[in-house]
Amino acid sequence: MSFMEYRELIQDGDTAIVFLGHDSMFPVTIQQGGQTQTKYGVIRHSTDLIGKRYGSKVTCSKGGWVYILYPTPELWTMNLPHRTQILYSTDISMITMMLELKPGSVVCESGTGSCSLSHAIIRTVAPTGHLYTVEFHQQRAEKAMEEFRQHKVDNLVTVKNQDVCKNGFGVSHVADAVFLDIPSPWEAIGHAKDALKIEGGRVCSFSPCIEQVQRTCLALEEHGFTEINTLEILLRIYDVRTVSLQIPDLGKAVEEKGSSESSDASKQVSVFQQGSALFKSGVSPRETVGHTGYLTFATKSLLF
């Protein structure tokens, strides 16, 4: 199986998502003879999963049921093993758009971390693009390479274990875009400029603190970058529910003498006002997810 190509049937060795609910799901590696325990009972891979279609409703041993989903970068972001703090789909979607990524794009990334953004970038630039990702921590770099091989996307990504602030990305003048998610991104701006194509390109830096943003913007100006701007994505989800509201009693309508039609209408209004009505209402949550990080974007100038 591959994260880049959808397949209908579940096979031995696949990575699948066991979906119990929107707030409860987890990944599982399908193995012949293996089994997975859930709160609804056991799922036996050989009889319950292998050969079935992705999206199937699978009944567990206790009578409950789950769905088996094909993994996408969005589902993987929600279920991946956390080796570092990760980026979520809200920020990832903005990064993909603002960096103007498309099939065939070449991207440099640092650091790799838990590969949340990496999977989204690979899907966007496939099938002819490439991702060069740099990870300072050796064990995390090795785990990233293992995951990319398991997900059959290793032909679209090159993982390097090195310090991007000292050694750069290992490539020069090939990238359409560069993404930085490191503690001191201002130290890597020069290497990012060298990695970008001579005719230009875009840079994005993710930082949780505004002091990091300030130093990064100064470094971008010093290296001749233009169109420098910083965004913060704050997500607020509204809960749409049906509420019952009492209709206010505004009194009887004025009746015109000698008019039976007006009398009938006033009776209808009076009866209608005494009930209640159902309305659709959007209610914001009492607690919302706040700040995640600042996204700073810039464009490489052709004059420097």
Image (cartoon, rainbow, N blue to C red):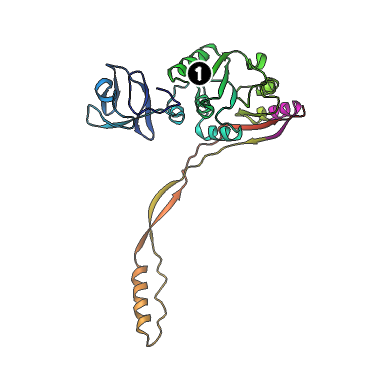
Rendered image quadrant of residue 260: bottom left
The C terminus appears in which quarter of the rendering? top right
Q: Residue furthest front?
A: 128
Q: Residue 11 in the image: x percent, y percent?
A: 33, 21
Residue at 35%, 67% in the rendered image:
274
Q: Front-most of 138 and 236? A: 138
Q: Residue 266 in the image: x percent, y percent?
A: 37, 77
Residue at 67%, 24% in the rendered image:
197
Magenta-tinted stretch: 214-228
Q: Residue furthest right?
A: 303
In the visual, does 83 lie left or right of 253?
A: right
Q: Is residue 220 magenta?
A: yes
The N terminus appears in which quarter of the rendering? top left
Q: Is residue 166 magenta?
A: no
Q: Residue 49 in the image: x percent, y percent?
A: 29, 24
Residue at 46%, 16% in the rendered image:
149
Q: Residue furthest bottom?
A: 258
Magenta stretch secondary structure, dominant: helix
**Residue for badge 1:** 155
Instruction: Specify the amino acid type for callout 1.
Output: Asn
Query: Does dot 1 land on a helix, a strand or a loop?
Result: helix
Asked if 219 appears above or below 270 in the picture, the reply is: above
Q: Residue 125 in the image: x percent, y percent?
A: 54, 27
Q: Residues within 10 Å of mark 1 (few under 14, many from 20)?
A: few
Rendered image quadrant of residue 225: top right
